Amino acid sequence: MPSDELTPPEAARWAARAGLRLPADRNAAVAATANHIHSVVAVLRELDFGDTPPAPAYRAEPENHDAAV
Amino acid sequence: MQPYELPLTAAADAIRARQLSPVELADSVLERIAQVEPHLQAYVTVAAEHTRRAAREAENDIAAGRYRGPLHGIPMGLKDLIDVAGAATSAGSRVRADHRAQADSTVAARLSAAGAILVGKTHTHEFAYGLTTPQTNNAWDTGRVAGGSSGGSAVAVAAGTATFTLGTDTGGSIRVPAALNGVVGLKPTYGLVPRHGVTSLSWSLDHVGSITRTVGDAALILTALAGHDPRDPASLTTPGTDYRPVSDADLTGLRVGVPRNHYFDHVDEEVEAAVRRAIDQLRALGARLVEVEIPMTRYIQATHWGLMVPEATAYHESTLRTVPELYQTDVRILLEAGELMPAGDYLRAQRSRTLMRQEWARMLQEVDLIVAPTVPATAVEAGQETITWADGTVEGVSDAYVRLSSPANITGAPSLSVPVGRDAAGLPIGMQLLGRPLGESVLLRVGQAYEQTQPARKLARTA
Protein backbone atom coordinates (compact mmCIF):
# COMPACT_ATOMS: atom_id res chain seq x y z
CA MET A 1 0.00 0.00 0.00
CA PRO A 2 1.43 3.42 -0.93
CA SER A 3 2.55 5.39 2.12
CA ASP A 4 0.07 8.21 1.53
CA GLU A 5 -2.99 5.94 1.56
CA LEU A 6 -5.36 5.96 4.51
CA THR A 7 -5.99 2.74 6.41
CA PRO A 8 -9.57 2.03 7.57
CA PRO A 9 -8.82 3.17 11.16
CA GLU A 10 -7.18 6.33 9.81
CA ALA A 11 -10.21 7.01 7.62
CA ALA A 12 -12.44 6.71 10.68
CA ARG A 13 -10.20 9.10 12.62
CA TRP A 14 -10.10 11.65 9.78
CA ALA A 15 -13.88 11.45 9.46
CA ALA A 16 -14.31 11.91 13.20
CA ARG A 17 -12.00 14.93 13.05
CA ALA A 18 -14.32 16.32 10.35
CA GLY A 19 -17.25 15.73 12.68
CA LEU A 20 -18.57 12.56 11.05
CA ARG A 21 -18.76 9.40 13.16
CA LEU A 22 -18.53 6.45 10.78
CA PRO A 23 -20.07 3.13 11.75
CA ALA A 24 -17.16 0.69 12.06
CA ASP A 25 -18.42 -1.45 9.21
CA ARG A 26 -18.00 1.48 6.80
CA ASN A 27 -14.37 2.31 7.56
CA ALA A 28 -12.84 0.06 4.92
CA ALA A 29 -15.15 1.15 2.10
CA VAL A 30 -14.75 4.84 2.95
CA ALA A 31 -10.97 4.44 3.10
CA ALA A 32 -10.93 2.74 -0.31
CA THR A 33 -13.10 5.43 -1.91
CA ALA A 34 -11.14 8.26 -0.28
CA ASN A 35 -7.88 6.72 -1.49
CA HIS A 36 -9.24 6.47 -5.02
CA ILE A 37 -10.38 10.10 -4.98
CA HIS A 38 -6.97 11.09 -3.60
CA SER A 39 -5.21 9.23 -6.42
CA VAL A 40 -7.25 11.25 -8.96
CA VAL A 41 -6.86 14.71 -7.44
CA ALA A 42 -3.21 14.27 -6.41
CA VAL A 43 -2.04 14.91 -9.99
CA LEU A 44 -2.89 18.60 -9.48
CA ARG A 45 0.28 18.80 -7.38
CA GLU A 46 2.26 18.59 -10.61
CA LEU A 47 1.02 22.03 -11.69
CA ASP A 48 3.14 25.11 -11.14
CA PHE A 49 0.52 27.59 -9.98
CA GLY A 50 2.86 30.51 -9.38
CA ASP A 51 0.63 33.41 -8.30
CA THR A 52 -2.53 31.89 -9.82
CA PRO A 53 -5.48 32.63 -7.55
CA PRO A 54 -8.28 30.14 -6.92
CA ALA A 55 -11.57 30.72 -8.69
CA PRO A 56 -14.21 30.10 -6.03
CA ALA A 57 -16.58 32.67 -7.49
CA TYR A 58 -15.88 33.51 -11.05
CA ARG A 59 -17.47 35.31 -13.97
CA ALA A 60 -17.86 33.28 -17.14
CA GLU A 61 -18.31 36.24 -19.44
CA PRO A 62 -15.26 37.95 -20.94
CA GLU A 63 -13.16 39.85 -18.41
CA ASN A 64 -13.78 43.18 -20.18
CA HIS A 65 -17.55 42.84 -19.81
CA ASP A 66 -17.76 45.04 -16.73
CA ALA A 67 -15.41 47.60 -18.18
CA ALA A 68 -17.69 48.01 -21.18
CA VAL A 69 -20.75 48.72 -19.08
CA MET B 1 -48.83 13.31 -36.73
CA GLN B 2 -50.21 13.44 -33.18
CA PRO B 3 -49.82 16.64 -31.12
CA TYR B 4 -47.44 14.93 -28.65
CA GLU B 5 -45.04 14.34 -31.55
CA LEU B 6 -44.66 18.06 -32.29
CA PRO B 7 -41.45 19.84 -31.33
CA LEU B 8 -41.99 22.93 -29.19
CA THR B 9 -41.49 25.34 -32.09
CA ALA B 10 -44.09 23.60 -34.25
CA ALA B 11 -46.56 23.24 -31.40
CA ALA B 12 -46.17 26.93 -30.54
CA ASP B 13 -46.75 27.94 -34.17
CA ALA B 14 -49.88 25.77 -34.32
CA ILE B 15 -51.22 27.20 -31.05
CA ARG B 16 -50.57 30.77 -32.13
CA ALA B 17 -52.33 30.09 -35.45
CA ARG B 18 -55.28 28.52 -33.54
CA GLN B 19 -54.74 25.26 -35.43
CA LEU B 20 -54.05 23.43 -32.17
CA SER B 21 -55.49 24.11 -28.76
CA PRO B 22 -53.46 23.67 -25.57
CA VAL B 23 -56.18 21.25 -24.43
CA GLU B 24 -55.63 19.01 -27.46
CA LEU B 25 -51.89 19.11 -26.89
CA ALA B 26 -52.17 18.37 -23.18
CA ASP B 27 -54.60 15.50 -23.75
CA SER B 28 -52.32 14.03 -26.39
CA VAL B 29 -49.27 14.20 -24.09
CA LEU B 30 -51.22 12.68 -21.19
CA GLU B 31 -52.42 9.84 -23.43
CA ARG B 32 -48.86 9.25 -24.52
CA ILE B 33 -47.80 9.13 -20.86
CA ALA B 34 -50.49 6.54 -20.13
CA GLN B 35 -49.20 4.49 -23.06
CA VAL B 36 -45.43 4.51 -22.51
CA GLU B 37 -44.66 5.69 -18.99
CA PRO B 38 -45.08 2.20 -17.47
CA HIS B 39 -42.13 1.08 -19.62
CA LEU B 40 -39.99 4.17 -19.13
CA GLN B 41 -40.49 5.52 -15.61
CA ALA B 42 -39.39 9.01 -16.60
CA TYR B 43 -41.68 10.76 -14.12
CA VAL B 44 -41.70 10.88 -10.33
CA THR B 45 -45.16 12.42 -10.40
CA VAL B 46 -47.62 13.32 -13.15
CA ALA B 47 -50.11 16.07 -12.35
CA ALA B 48 -52.77 15.16 -14.91
CA GLU B 49 -55.61 17.18 -13.41
CA HIS B 50 -53.43 20.26 -13.04
CA THR B 51 -52.26 19.83 -16.63
CA ARG B 52 -55.82 19.65 -17.99
CA ARG B 53 -56.98 22.61 -15.90
CA ALA B 54 -54.01 24.76 -16.88
CA ALA B 55 -54.50 23.80 -20.52
CA ARG B 56 -58.14 24.93 -20.40
CA GLU B 57 -57.03 28.24 -18.84
CA ALA B 58 -54.41 28.68 -21.55
CA GLU B 59 -56.99 27.93 -24.22
CA ASN B 60 -59.37 30.50 -22.75
CA ASP B 61 -56.64 33.12 -22.36
CA ILE B 62 -55.44 32.69 -25.92
CA ALA B 63 -59.00 32.79 -27.24
CA ALA B 64 -59.50 36.04 -25.32
CA GLY B 65 -56.40 37.57 -26.91
CA ARG B 66 -54.10 37.10 -23.91
CA TYR B 67 -51.42 35.14 -25.76
CA ARG B 68 -48.20 35.17 -23.74
CA GLY B 69 -45.77 33.87 -26.34
CA PRO B 70 -44.38 30.63 -27.71
CA LEU B 71 -44.39 28.71 -24.39
CA HIS B 72 -48.05 29.45 -23.70
CA GLY B 73 -49.95 26.18 -23.31
CA ILE B 74 -46.87 23.96 -23.80
CA PRO B 75 -46.60 20.84 -21.56
CA MET B 76 -43.23 20.51 -19.83
CA GLY B 77 -41.45 18.38 -17.25
CA LEU B 78 -39.03 19.64 -14.62
CA LYS B 79 -36.20 17.59 -13.15
CA ASP B 80 -37.06 16.80 -9.56
CA LEU B 81 -34.29 19.02 -8.23
CA ILE B 82 -36.19 22.13 -9.31
CA ASP B 83 -38.55 23.70 -6.77
CA VAL B 84 -42.19 24.23 -7.65
CA ALA B 85 -44.24 25.88 -4.91
CA GLY B 86 -46.33 23.39 -2.98
CA ALA B 87 -44.75 20.33 -4.56
CA ALA B 88 -42.11 18.01 -3.17
CA THR B 89 -38.60 18.28 -4.60
CA SER B 90 -37.59 14.70 -3.97
CA ALA B 91 -34.14 14.92 -5.59
CA GLY B 92 -34.56 11.20 -6.18
CA SER B 93 -33.86 10.56 -2.51
CA ARG B 94 -35.55 9.16 0.58
CA VAL B 95 -33.76 11.97 2.43
CA ARG B 96 -36.36 14.32 0.92
CA ALA B 97 -39.40 12.14 1.69
CA ASP B 98 -41.28 14.89 3.53
CA HIS B 99 -40.09 17.79 1.45
CA ARG B 100 -42.40 20.50 0.16
CA ALA B 101 -41.11 23.54 -1.71
CA GLN B 102 -42.27 26.86 -0.26
CA ALA B 103 -41.81 28.83 -3.46
CA ASP B 104 -41.07 28.46 -7.14
CA SER B 105 -37.47 28.33 -8.28
CA THR B 106 -36.54 31.18 -10.61
CA VAL B 107 -36.73 28.93 -13.66
CA ALA B 108 -40.12 27.46 -12.67
CA ALA B 109 -41.46 30.97 -12.09
CA ARG B 110 -40.17 32.23 -15.44
CA LEU B 111 -41.64 29.27 -17.34
CA SER B 112 -44.94 29.64 -15.52
CA ALA B 113 -45.04 33.33 -16.36
CA ALA B 114 -44.41 32.41 -20.00
CA GLY B 115 -47.46 30.14 -19.89
CA ALA B 116 -45.78 26.71 -19.91
CA ILE B 117 -47.73 23.94 -18.16
CA LEU B 118 -46.05 21.62 -15.68
CA VAL B 119 -47.00 18.01 -16.45
CA GLY B 120 -44.80 16.50 -13.76
CA LYS B 121 -41.42 16.17 -12.07
CA THR B 122 -38.89 13.89 -13.75
CA HIS B 123 -36.50 11.40 -12.23
CA THR B 124 -32.93 12.33 -11.33
CA HIS B 125 -30.02 10.23 -10.15
CA GLU B 126 -30.12 10.74 -6.39
CA PHE B 127 -29.19 14.38 -5.72
CA ALA B 128 -27.79 14.48 -9.28
CA TYR B 129 -24.71 12.60 -8.04
CA GLY B 130 -24.44 10.01 -10.82
CA LEU B 131 -24.64 9.46 -14.55
CA THR B 132 -27.25 6.73 -15.04
CA THR B 133 -30.61 7.52 -13.30
CA PRO B 134 -31.38 3.88 -12.42
CA GLN B 135 -35.11 4.56 -11.84
CA THR B 136 -35.61 5.36 -15.54
CA ASN B 137 -35.15 3.32 -18.73
CA ASN B 138 -33.62 4.47 -22.00
CA ALA B 139 -36.28 5.63 -24.46
CA TRP B 140 -34.81 3.58 -27.32
CA ASP B 141 -34.07 0.35 -25.44
CA THR B 142 -35.64 -0.13 -22.04
CA GLY B 143 -32.88 -2.55 -21.05
CA ARG B 144 -30.33 0.24 -21.24
CA VAL B 145 -29.51 3.22 -19.04
CA ALA B 146 -31.25 6.54 -19.47
CA GLY B 147 -28.04 8.40 -18.68
CA GLY B 148 -27.99 11.00 -16.01
CA SER B 149 -28.42 12.68 -13.90
CA SER B 150 -31.31 14.32 -15.81
CA GLY B 151 -32.38 10.90 -17.12
CA GLY B 152 -36.12 11.34 -16.66
CA SER B 153 -36.08 14.70 -18.43
CA ALA B 154 -34.27 13.33 -21.49
CA VAL B 155 -36.40 10.20 -21.74
CA ALA B 156 -39.64 12.19 -21.47
CA VAL B 157 -38.66 14.42 -24.38
CA ALA B 158 -37.36 11.50 -26.47
CA ALA B 159 -40.59 9.55 -25.96
CA GLY B 160 -43.03 12.42 -26.41
CA THR B 161 -44.27 12.52 -22.84
CA ALA B 162 -43.23 16.18 -22.51
CA THR B 163 -42.78 18.77 -25.24
CA PHE B 164 -39.69 20.01 -23.41
CA THR B 165 -38.02 19.59 -20.03
CA LEU B 166 -35.41 21.20 -17.83
CA GLY B 167 -32.42 19.45 -16.36
CA THR B 168 -29.30 20.36 -14.43
CA ASP B 169 -25.69 19.78 -15.44
CA THR B 170 -22.70 19.59 -13.07
CA GLY B 171 -20.44 17.35 -15.16
CA GLY B 172 -22.66 16.51 -18.13
CA SER B 173 -26.03 15.73 -16.57
CA ILE B 174 -28.08 17.46 -19.28
CA ARG B 175 -25.92 16.54 -22.26
CA VAL B 176 -25.18 12.92 -21.36
CA PRO B 177 -28.82 11.75 -21.17
CA ALA B 178 -29.72 14.00 -24.11
CA ALA B 179 -27.07 12.24 -26.21
CA LEU B 180 -28.04 8.77 -25.02
CA ASN B 181 -31.72 9.37 -25.86
CA GLY B 182 -31.33 11.23 -29.15
CA VAL B 183 -32.52 14.69 -28.11
CA VAL B 184 -31.02 18.18 -27.83
CA GLY B 185 -29.43 19.26 -24.53
CA LEU B 186 -28.16 22.76 -23.78
CA LYS B 187 -25.90 23.59 -20.85
CA PRO B 188 -25.69 27.38 -21.00
CA THR B 189 -22.81 29.56 -19.82
CA TYR B 190 -22.25 29.37 -16.06
CA GLY B 191 -24.46 31.97 -14.44
CA LEU B 192 -26.63 32.75 -17.47
CA VAL B 193 -29.67 30.86 -16.13
CA PRO B 194 -30.30 31.47 -12.41
CA ARG B 195 -30.22 28.46 -10.08
CA HIS B 196 -32.20 29.93 -7.21
CA GLY B 197 -34.53 27.22 -5.89
CA VAL B 198 -32.64 24.38 -7.56
CA THR B 199 -31.05 21.77 -5.30
CA SER B 200 -27.29 22.00 -5.62
CA LEU B 201 -24.83 19.21 -6.27
CA SER B 202 -21.76 21.46 -6.53
CA TRP B 203 -22.25 25.22 -6.44
CA SER B 204 -19.31 26.13 -8.62
CA LEU B 205 -20.18 23.59 -11.34
CA ASP B 206 -24.01 23.52 -11.39
CA HIS B 207 -26.01 24.76 -14.38
CA VAL B 208 -29.71 24.64 -15.34
CA GLY B 209 -30.66 24.10 -18.96
CA SER B 210 -33.12 22.58 -21.38
CA ILE B 211 -33.74 19.27 -23.07
CA THR B 212 -35.72 19.59 -26.29
CA ARG B 213 -36.48 17.89 -29.60
CA THR B 214 -34.77 20.53 -31.74
CA VAL B 215 -32.14 23.24 -31.51
CA GLY B 216 -34.76 25.89 -32.27
CA ASP B 217 -36.73 24.66 -29.27
CA ALA B 218 -33.64 25.10 -27.06
CA ALA B 219 -33.33 28.70 -28.25
CA LEU B 220 -36.92 29.44 -27.25
CA ILE B 221 -36.38 28.06 -23.75
CA LEU B 222 -33.11 29.92 -23.24
CA THR B 223 -34.79 33.16 -24.28
CA ALA B 224 -37.38 32.61 -21.53
CA LEU B 225 -34.86 31.55 -18.84
CA ALA B 226 -31.78 33.75 -19.25
CA GLY B 227 -31.48 36.86 -17.17
CA HIS B 228 -30.10 38.12 -13.89
CA ASP B 229 -31.40 37.02 -10.51
CA PRO B 230 -29.43 38.35 -7.52
CA ARG B 231 -30.56 35.37 -5.42
CA ASP B 232 -28.04 33.23 -7.35
CA PRO B 233 -24.60 34.62 -6.46
CA ALA B 234 -23.18 33.39 -9.77
CA SER B 235 -25.94 34.99 -11.83
CA LEU B 236 -24.62 37.12 -14.66
CA THR B 237 -25.90 40.62 -15.27
CA THR B 238 -25.93 40.06 -19.02
CA PRO B 239 -29.02 41.69 -20.54
CA GLY B 240 -31.69 39.38 -21.90
CA THR B 241 -31.69 38.64 -25.60
CA ASP B 242 -33.63 36.69 -28.20
CA TYR B 243 -31.64 33.53 -28.84
CA ARG B 244 -33.77 32.23 -31.73
CA PRO B 245 -31.28 31.57 -34.54
CA VAL B 246 -31.75 32.85 -38.04
CA SER B 247 -32.60 30.00 -40.37
CA ASP B 248 -29.62 30.76 -42.62
CA ALA B 249 -27.67 27.51 -43.00
CA ASP B 250 -24.63 29.18 -44.59
CA LEU B 251 -21.64 28.77 -42.27
CA THR B 252 -19.10 30.35 -44.62
CA GLY B 253 -16.15 31.76 -42.72
CA LEU B 254 -16.98 30.10 -39.42
CA ARG B 255 -13.94 28.48 -37.80
CA VAL B 256 -14.81 25.12 -36.31
CA GLY B 257 -12.23 23.65 -33.97
CA VAL B 258 -11.73 19.89 -34.22
CA PRO B 259 -9.77 18.50 -31.26
CA ARG B 260 -6.70 16.47 -32.09
CA ASN B 261 -6.48 15.15 -28.52
CA HIS B 262 -8.78 14.08 -25.68
CA TYR B 263 -12.19 14.19 -27.38
CA PHE B 264 -11.56 11.32 -29.78
CA ASP B 265 -9.47 9.18 -27.42
CA HIS B 266 -11.21 6.06 -26.14
CA VAL B 267 -14.31 6.77 -28.22
CA ASP B 268 -16.44 4.03 -29.75
CA GLU B 269 -15.80 3.65 -33.51
CA GLU B 270 -19.42 4.20 -34.48
CA VAL B 271 -19.66 7.29 -32.28
CA GLU B 272 -16.51 8.76 -33.81
CA ALA B 273 -17.67 7.98 -37.35
CA ALA B 274 -21.06 9.64 -36.79
CA VAL B 275 -19.50 12.75 -35.26
CA ARG B 276 -16.91 13.06 -38.03
CA ARG B 277 -19.70 12.74 -40.64
CA ALA B 278 -21.50 15.59 -38.90
CA ILE B 279 -18.30 17.65 -38.89
CA ASP B 280 -17.95 17.03 -42.64
CA GLN B 281 -21.51 18.30 -42.98
CA LEU B 282 -20.50 21.55 -41.25
CA ARG B 283 -17.64 21.88 -43.72
CA ALA B 284 -20.10 21.33 -46.58
CA LEU B 285 -22.10 24.25 -45.18
CA GLY B 286 -19.06 26.49 -45.52
CA ALA B 287 -17.31 26.15 -42.16
CA ARG B 288 -13.54 26.01 -42.03
CA LEU B 289 -12.19 23.14 -39.95
CA VAL B 290 -9.23 24.01 -37.71
CA GLU B 291 -7.38 21.43 -35.69
CA VAL B 292 -7.06 22.43 -32.04
CA GLU B 293 -5.09 21.10 -29.08
CA ILE B 294 -7.23 20.81 -25.94
CA PRO B 295 -5.19 22.21 -23.01
CA MET B 296 -4.51 20.57 -19.66
CA THR B 297 -6.40 17.36 -20.41
CA ARG B 298 -4.38 15.45 -17.82
CA TYR B 299 -5.99 17.62 -15.13
CA ILE B 300 -9.64 17.58 -16.22
CA GLN B 301 -10.86 14.75 -14.01
CA ALA B 302 -8.71 15.87 -11.08
CA THR B 303 -10.06 19.41 -11.29
CA HIS B 304 -13.64 18.24 -11.65
CA TRP B 305 -13.43 15.87 -8.70
CA GLY B 306 -11.44 18.33 -6.63
CA LEU B 307 -14.31 20.82 -6.97
CA MET B 308 -17.35 18.54 -6.94
CA VAL B 309 -16.50 16.05 -4.21
CA PRO B 310 -15.98 18.52 -1.33
CA GLU B 311 -18.76 20.86 -2.46
CA ALA B 312 -21.28 17.99 -2.60
CA THR B 313 -20.18 16.75 0.80
CA ALA B 314 -20.54 20.24 2.22
CA TYR B 315 -24.10 20.56 0.87
CA HIS B 316 -25.09 17.30 2.59
CA GLU B 317 -23.14 17.89 5.81
CA SER B 318 -26.19 17.96 8.07
CA THR B 319 -28.20 15.04 6.67
CA LEU B 320 -25.12 12.85 6.28
CA ARG B 321 -24.84 13.05 10.06
CA THR B 322 -28.52 12.67 10.93
CA VAL B 323 -29.97 10.25 8.33
CA PRO B 324 -27.03 8.65 6.46
CA GLU B 325 -28.94 5.38 6.02
CA LEU B 326 -31.48 7.13 3.76
CA TYR B 327 -28.94 7.75 0.99
CA GLN B 328 -28.37 5.22 -1.79
CA THR B 329 -25.14 3.24 -1.41
CA ASP B 330 -23.30 4.87 -4.33
CA VAL B 331 -24.05 8.41 -3.19
CA ARG B 332 -23.49 7.87 0.53
CA ILE B 333 -19.96 6.54 0.05
CA LEU B 334 -18.96 9.51 -2.10
CA LEU B 335 -20.37 11.97 0.44
CA GLU B 336 -18.56 10.22 3.29
CA ALA B 337 -15.25 9.99 1.44
CA GLY B 338 -15.56 13.68 0.58
CA GLU B 339 -15.21 14.46 4.29
CA LEU B 340 -11.62 13.24 4.04
CA MET B 341 -10.49 15.60 1.28
CA PRO B 342 -8.09 18.28 2.58
CA ALA B 343 -8.78 21.93 1.78
CA GLY B 344 -5.47 22.00 -0.10
CA ASP B 345 -6.88 19.66 -2.72
CA TYR B 346 -9.94 21.86 -3.17
CA LEU B 347 -7.84 24.99 -3.53
CA ARG B 348 -5.56 23.31 -6.06
CA ALA B 349 -8.66 22.42 -8.07
CA GLN B 350 -9.86 26.02 -7.91
CA ARG B 351 -6.46 27.29 -9.03
CA SER B 352 -6.34 24.66 -11.77
CA ARG B 353 -9.75 25.93 -12.91
CA THR B 354 -8.28 29.44 -13.21
CA LEU B 355 -5.51 28.10 -15.43
CA MET B 356 -7.90 25.97 -17.46
CA ARG B 357 -10.24 28.89 -18.12
CA GLN B 358 -7.29 30.99 -19.30
CA GLU B 359 -6.07 28.22 -21.60
CA TRP B 360 -9.54 27.57 -23.03
CA ALA B 361 -10.03 31.30 -23.64
CA ARG B 362 -6.74 31.32 -25.55
CA MET B 363 -7.82 28.30 -27.62
CA LEU B 364 -11.22 29.84 -28.35
CA GLN B 365 -9.54 32.92 -29.82
CA GLU B 366 -8.40 30.70 -32.69
CA VAL B 367 -11.81 29.22 -33.46
CA ASP B 368 -15.48 30.19 -33.11
CA LEU B 369 -16.52 26.90 -31.55
CA ILE B 370 -15.30 23.37 -30.95
CA VAL B 371 -17.05 20.19 -32.03
CA ALA B 372 -16.66 16.81 -30.34
CA PRO B 373 -18.57 13.72 -29.27
CA THR B 374 -20.83 14.37 -26.27
CA VAL B 375 -20.18 10.94 -24.78
CA PRO B 376 -17.68 8.31 -25.94
CA ALA B 377 -20.19 5.46 -26.06
CA THR B 378 -23.92 4.94 -26.59
CA ALA B 379 -26.22 3.78 -23.78
CA VAL B 380 -24.86 0.75 -21.92
CA GLU B 381 -27.04 -2.02 -20.55
CA ALA B 382 -28.57 -1.38 -17.15
CA GLY B 383 -26.25 -2.64 -14.44
CA GLN B 384 -23.12 -2.54 -16.63
CA GLU B 385 -20.35 -0.95 -14.58
CA THR B 386 -17.40 -0.68 -16.95
CA ILE B 387 -16.53 -0.15 -20.60
CA THR B 388 -13.53 -1.95 -22.12
CA TRP B 389 -11.86 0.01 -24.92
CA ALA B 390 -10.14 -1.50 -27.96
CA ASP B 391 -6.69 -1.21 -26.35
CA GLY B 392 -7.86 -3.19 -23.33
CA THR B 393 -8.28 -0.17 -21.05
CA VAL B 394 -11.19 -0.59 -18.63
CA GLU B 395 -13.10 2.54 -17.63
CA GLY B 396 -16.03 3.00 -15.26
CA VAL B 397 -19.26 3.84 -17.09
CA SER B 398 -19.76 7.07 -15.14
CA ASP B 399 -16.14 8.12 -15.68
CA ALA B 400 -16.55 7.52 -19.42
CA TYR B 401 -19.83 9.38 -19.68
CA VAL B 402 -18.53 12.44 -17.84
CA ARG B 403 -15.08 12.54 -19.45
CA LEU B 404 -15.98 14.66 -22.49
CA SER B 405 -18.61 16.85 -20.90
CA SER B 406 -16.98 18.04 -17.66
CA PRO B 407 -14.57 20.56 -19.25
CA ALA B 408 -17.55 22.82 -19.99
CA ASN B 409 -18.57 22.69 -16.33
CA ILE B 410 -15.06 23.53 -15.14
CA THR B 411 -14.65 26.45 -17.55
CA GLY B 412 -18.29 27.60 -17.57
CA ALA B 413 -18.35 27.47 -21.37
CA PRO B 414 -21.69 26.77 -23.06
CA SER B 415 -22.20 23.36 -24.63
CA LEU B 416 -24.99 22.13 -26.89
CA SER B 417 -25.50 18.43 -27.59
CA VAL B 418 -27.25 17.55 -30.84
CA PRO B 419 -28.15 14.10 -32.17
CA VAL B 420 -26.00 12.97 -35.12
CA GLY B 421 -27.35 9.53 -35.87
CA ARG B 422 -27.57 6.11 -34.33
CA ASP B 423 -25.30 3.10 -34.05
CA ALA B 424 -25.93 -0.35 -35.55
CA ALA B 425 -28.04 -1.27 -32.52
CA GLY B 426 -30.24 1.79 -33.14
CA LEU B 427 -28.92 3.73 -30.13
CA PRO B 428 -28.54 7.51 -30.45
CA ILE B 429 -25.22 9.32 -30.80
CA GLY B 430 -24.62 12.93 -29.74
CA MET B 431 -22.21 15.65 -30.86
CA GLN B 432 -21.47 18.60 -28.61
CA LEU B 433 -20.75 22.12 -29.76
CA LEU B 434 -18.60 24.04 -27.26
CA GLY B 435 -18.40 27.81 -27.42
CA ARG B 436 -16.97 30.88 -25.79
CA PRO B 437 -18.68 32.06 -22.61
CA LEU B 438 -21.96 33.70 -23.68
CA GLY B 439 -21.48 32.22 -27.15
CA GLU B 440 -24.85 30.43 -27.11
CA SER B 441 -26.03 32.19 -30.27
CA VAL B 442 -23.15 30.71 -32.26
CA LEU B 443 -23.83 27.21 -30.96
CA LEU B 444 -27.56 27.48 -31.67
CA ARG B 445 -26.92 28.82 -35.17
CA VAL B 446 -24.51 26.01 -36.02
CA GLY B 447 -26.65 23.37 -34.35
CA GLN B 448 -29.69 24.46 -36.28
CA ALA B 449 -27.76 24.69 -39.55
CA TYR B 450 -26.65 21.08 -39.08
CA GLU B 451 -30.12 19.98 -38.04
CA GLN B 452 -31.61 21.45 -41.22
CA THR B 453 -29.41 19.17 -43.33
CA GLN B 454 -30.91 16.10 -41.67
CA PRO B 455 -34.34 14.47 -41.96
CA ALA B 456 -36.70 15.40 -39.12
CA ARG B 457 -36.02 13.09 -36.19
CA LYS B 458 -38.76 10.78 -35.03
CA LEU B 459 -39.63 10.04 -31.43
CA ALA B 460 -38.30 6.90 -29.79
CA ARG B 461 -40.51 3.95 -30.67
CA THR B 462 -41.14 3.08 -27.09
CA ALA B 463 -43.71 0.33 -26.79
Image (cartoon, coloured by chain):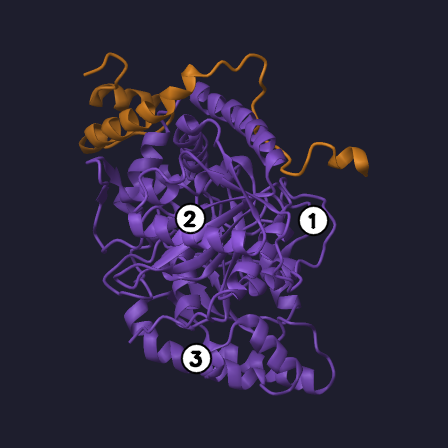
Chain colours: A orange, B purple
Circle 1 SS class: loop
The kind of residue on which mark 3 rests is: Leu
Is B413 displayed left or right of A12 in the figure?
right
* Quadrant housing residue B209: bottom right
Q: Residue B190 at what x, y percent from top left? A: 58, 42
Dot 3 crowding, Cα within 10 Å, few <14, some 14–19, many 20+ = many
What kind of residue is marked 1? Answer: His
Q: Secondary structure at mark 2?
A: loop
Query: Residue beneath label 3, please?
Result: B30
Residue name at image x 70 percent, y 78 percent? B67
Q: Is residue B448 in sight in this rendering?
A: yes
Residue at 22% from the left image edge and 35% from the top image edge = B393
Q: Nearer the viewer, residue B446 or A61?
A: B446
- Residue located beneath label 1 in the image: B228
Label 2 close to label 3 by CB (< 8 Å): no
Of all chains, the one bearing label 2 is: B
In the picture of the structure, the residue carrying the numbered disc 2 is: B374
Let me know if residue B91 appears in the view: no
User: As shown in the figure, which amino acid type bears the numbered disc 2?
Assistant: Thr
Q: Alpha-carbon distance for marks 2 and 1?
A: 28 Å
For the point 51% across and 26% down, which residue is it? B350
Pointer 2 or 3: first along the chain: 3
Along the line of sight, which residue is nearer the eye, B277 or B293? Answer: B277
Which quadrant holds residue B216? bottom right
Q: Quadrant of the C terminus of chain B?
A: bottom left
Q: Chain of mark 1?
A: B
State the image coordinates of residue B319 (x, y, percent, origin top left). 39, 41
The reply to whether discs 1 and 3 touch (Cβ–Cβ < 8 Å) is no
Q: Is residue B387 above or below residue B33?
A: above
